[in-house]
Amino acid sequence: MARRRYQKGNIRKRGKRNPVWELQWWADIIQPDGSFGRKRESRILGTVSEMNRRQAMKAAEELLRPLNLGKITPFSNILFREFIEKNFIPNAFPILKLSTRKRYRFALDKHLLPAFGEQRLCDIGTLNIQSFVIQKMDGGLGWEAVNHFRNLLSKIFATAKKWEYFPGDNPAAGVELP
């Protein structure tokens, strides 16, 4: 796990015509190889005409409070496709029966990878999966097939959480089938 540290961030004025207060800080991320890293993040706090530097510092402190308390967990930058091909298939498939492997492989290649392949694992949420399920049902697939997709996605996210590639709750758990 990355070392916890207290951050005040860097507050600066940005812009000439309509200057704004910008806060910059370091965010922890998980690299695709599983190691921890840091990247610079920034957010606009407000315009200089609306707040002075002291008010901007107070807003920055409020914004960074969850990070300083350790309540924000780092996200992985790994894509869904990369996680499936480099981690899930080589490490989770050998445990499964041959028939289950074939069915999972077909579902991944035909449906899940085209839909979620280029998204980061941490960017896929319950709403994304819910709309995917509804789209497949409207496309003519049966309830059993769509339930299989949801269960496979749930297994993928549970595995990613177990292997520390996904810090949040399982987004497939909240999906309701029509």
Image: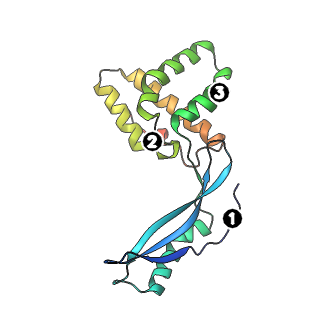
Earlier in the chain: of badge 3 and badge 2, it is 3
Closest to the camera, between mark 3 and mark 2, is 3
Q: Looking at numbered disc 2 in the image, what kind of residue is underneath it?
A: Gly
Q: What residue do we see at 52% from left, 33% from top?
A: 81
Mark 3 lies on a secondary structure that is: helix
Q: Looking at numbered disc 1 in the image, what kind of residue is underneath it?
A: Arg
Q: Compute the Cα span from label 3 to label 2.
A: 23 Å
Provide residue 38's location: percent of width, then percent of height. 62, 58
Q: Is residue 163 visible?
A: yes
Q: State the residue in front, 95 or 88.
A: 88
How many numbered callouts? 3
- Vertically, is 107 above or below 125? above
Q: Which mark is residue 174?
A: 2
Q: State the residue in front, 158 or 122.
A: 122
Mark 2 lies on a secondary structure that is: helix
Mark 1 lies on a secondary structure that is: loop
Left or right? Give the position of 118 relative to 137: right
Q: Which residue is mark 3?
A: 92
The image quadrant of residue 163 is top right
- Vertically, is 165 above or below 11? above
The quadrant in which the C terminus is found is top left
Q: Which residue is mark 1?
A: 4
